[in-house]
């Protein structure tokens, strides 16, 4: 709640411009917008590949069924914090006896994205610090003490992901912690090569949807170069990672973080907001509709049977 309120205080004055929004004054550049839309397919294809890899200790799944599972995980994730609903929707394509472990594999698959996001966020803070860029009201983002905290957090996340077995002794052996210990034990089923592969695929996906974000920013005519644009996007995602949120609330958090980071590049704060709405719609809303269609088809097949 504190982070939500902080973002609100930092960006509330800029959102007042939305009341004066005139769509006739917005010039959309369609080439980067179409390119961003086309990247939706590789974005979710890479995520399906990542989930397929994470299911190795549970069940073999074809890439086609992995894509269906990933899409079916989006609708329930819209209403749960940090998209944990994916652990409910995705395993529905698995055999019934494998769905609980499938949910754990889904959680591990999602966790693989966090070290990458933090690492790129730290990289962006270092970049802006070296370039002497200061963000109004948030100058701590480029302070070296803040960067050091980010580096430590990133290292801890990487170690936790790669070596979960070393965390088990620190979990108290009791009935209350039995579930946590069993989850950590499950994460030990992955080989070191599979873990590194998951991190590599997570990095590939992060780059893809970061480029999508940058392209939507360009499509609204915000003058920002590729390097500055990508580093800004990295920082936006790092800020978003601190907030536990359902996907429906993600739009508001994304808009606030985008305005906060990009206000040094444009005086029209409605443009970063609109770019966030466009990206959220093409990257989450449209795939969620596709996932809902698979639920409808499955339900109709059961009625026919």
Image (spheres, grey):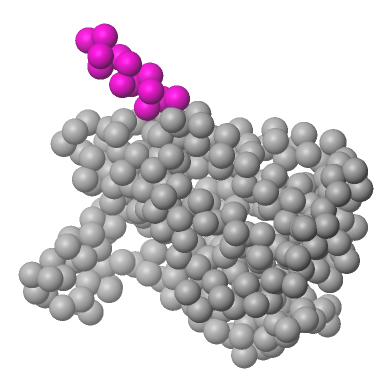
- Residue 283 in sight in this render: yes
Picture coordinates of residue 298, whole percent (x, y): 33, 21
Q: Main secondary structure of the magenta part?
A: helix
Residue plotted at (39% across, 43% down): 76
Residue plotted at (50% across, 29% down): 290
Q: Residue furthest left?
A: 175
- Residue 154 in sight in this render: no
Picture coordinates of residue 250, whole percent (x, y): 55, 56
Picture coordinates of residue 53, whole percent (x, y): 40, 42
In the image: residue 289, left or right of residue 141: left
Residue plotted at (62% across, 72% down): 8
Q: Which residue lies furthest to the front in this view?
A: 19
Q: Give the range drawn in magenta.
A: 293-305
Q: In which quarter of the image is residue 159?
A: bottom left
**Residue 249 magenta-highlighted:** no
Picture coordinates of residue 37, whole percent (x, y): 70, 36
Residue plotted at (62% across, 42% down): 281
In the image: residue 172, left or right of residue 157: left
């Amino acid at each position: 709640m504190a982070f939500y309120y902080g973002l609100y205080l930092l960006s509330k004055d800029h959102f007042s411009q939305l009341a004066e929004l005139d769509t006739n004054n917005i010039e959309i550049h369609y080439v980067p917008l179409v390119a961003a839309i086309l990247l939706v397919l590789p974005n979710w294809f890479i995520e399906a590949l990542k989930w397929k890899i994470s299911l190795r200790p549970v069940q073999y799944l074809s890439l086609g069924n992995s894509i269906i599972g990933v899409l079916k995980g989006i609708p329930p994730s819209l209403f749960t914090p940090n998209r944990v609903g994916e652990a409910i929707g995705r395993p529905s394509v698995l055999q019934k006896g494998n769905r609980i472990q499938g949910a754990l594999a889904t959680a591990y698959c999602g966790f693989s994205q966090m070290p990458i996001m933090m690492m790129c966020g730290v990289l962006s803070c270092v970049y802006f610090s070296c370039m002497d860029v200061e963000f109004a009201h948030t100058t701590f983002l480029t302070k070296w003490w803040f960067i050091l905290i980010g580096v430590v957090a990133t290292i801890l996340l990487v170690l936790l992901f790669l070596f979960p077995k070393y965390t088990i002794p620190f979990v108290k052996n009791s009935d209350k912690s039995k579930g946590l210990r069993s989850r950590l034990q499950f994460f030990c089923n992955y080989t070191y090569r599979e873990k590194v592969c998951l991190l590599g695929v997570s990095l590939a996906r992060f780059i893809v949807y970061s480029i999508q974000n940058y392209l939507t920013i360009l499509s609204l005519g915000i003058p920002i170069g590729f390097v500055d644009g990508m580093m800004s996007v990295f920082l936006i995602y790092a800020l978003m990672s601190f907030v536990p949120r359902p996907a429906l609330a993600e739009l508001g958090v994304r808009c606030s973080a985008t305005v906060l980071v990009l206000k040094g590049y444009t005086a029209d704060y409605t443009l970063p907001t609109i770019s966030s709405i466009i990206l959220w719609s093409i990257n989450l809303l449209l795939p969620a509709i596709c996932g809902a269609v698979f639920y409808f088809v499955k339900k109709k097949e059961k009625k026919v049977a």
